[in-house]
Amino acid sequence: MRELINQRIEYFREKIYNALDSNDTQSALLYRATIKELELLKQNLSDEPSLSSIEDQYYTTLELAQLLNVHQTSITRKAKKLKGIKIPKGWLFSKKYIDSLLKEDFRI
């Protein structure tokens, strides 16, 4: 992934030089902004937690439903109340937060 990002950065650097040679400063600024986004993405790539780390910190909707002995739909409906994080394929729920609710004898 890093190699692909580096290739794209180099590609847009060439585009900047070509735009500046033709006095197209607007395009050069656009390419520079793209390079900055790619560099930020590359930097954040190393900061992202691993998948196993995420699994250790969060419950999925199914896991939480099984833990609370309720249907998944009930969890989805109460996701905001449970401070869920919306992801493309559902919700994630902080294990720390849910565990603290369970200690307080929380009911859904």
Image (spheres, rainbow, N blue to C red):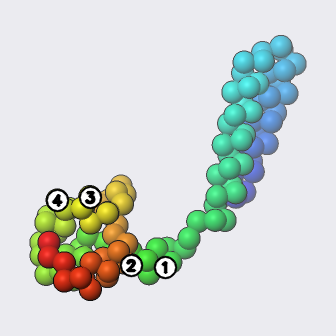
Sequence-wise, the earlier of marks 3 and 2 is 3
Sequence-wise, the earlier of marks 1 and 3 is 1
Q: Residue 97's x, y, as percent?
A: 35, 74
The image quadrant where one finds the C terminus is: bottom left
The residue singled out by tag 3 in the image is 80
Please determine whether, in this image, residue 104 is positioned above or below residue 86.
below
Q: Residue 103's x, y, as percent?
A: 26, 86
The image quadrant where one finds the N terminus is: bottom right
Say which mark, if any, is on residue 96.
Answer: 2
Sequence-wise, the earlier of marks 1 and 2 is 1
Q: Are marks 3 and 4 in contact (CB under 8 Å)?
A: no
Q: Residues within 10 Å of mark 3 (few under 14, many from 20)?
A: few
Q: Secondary structure at mark 2?
A: helix
The residue singled out by tag 1 in the image is 52
Please determine whether, in this image, residue 10 is positioned above or below residue 103.
above
The residue singled out by tag 4 in the image is 77
Q: Amino acid at mark 1?
A: Ser
Give the distance between the C-alpha atoms of the residues marked 1 and 2, in whole angstroms: 16 Å
Q: Secondary structure at mark 1?
A: helix
- Closest to the observer: 27 or 66? 66
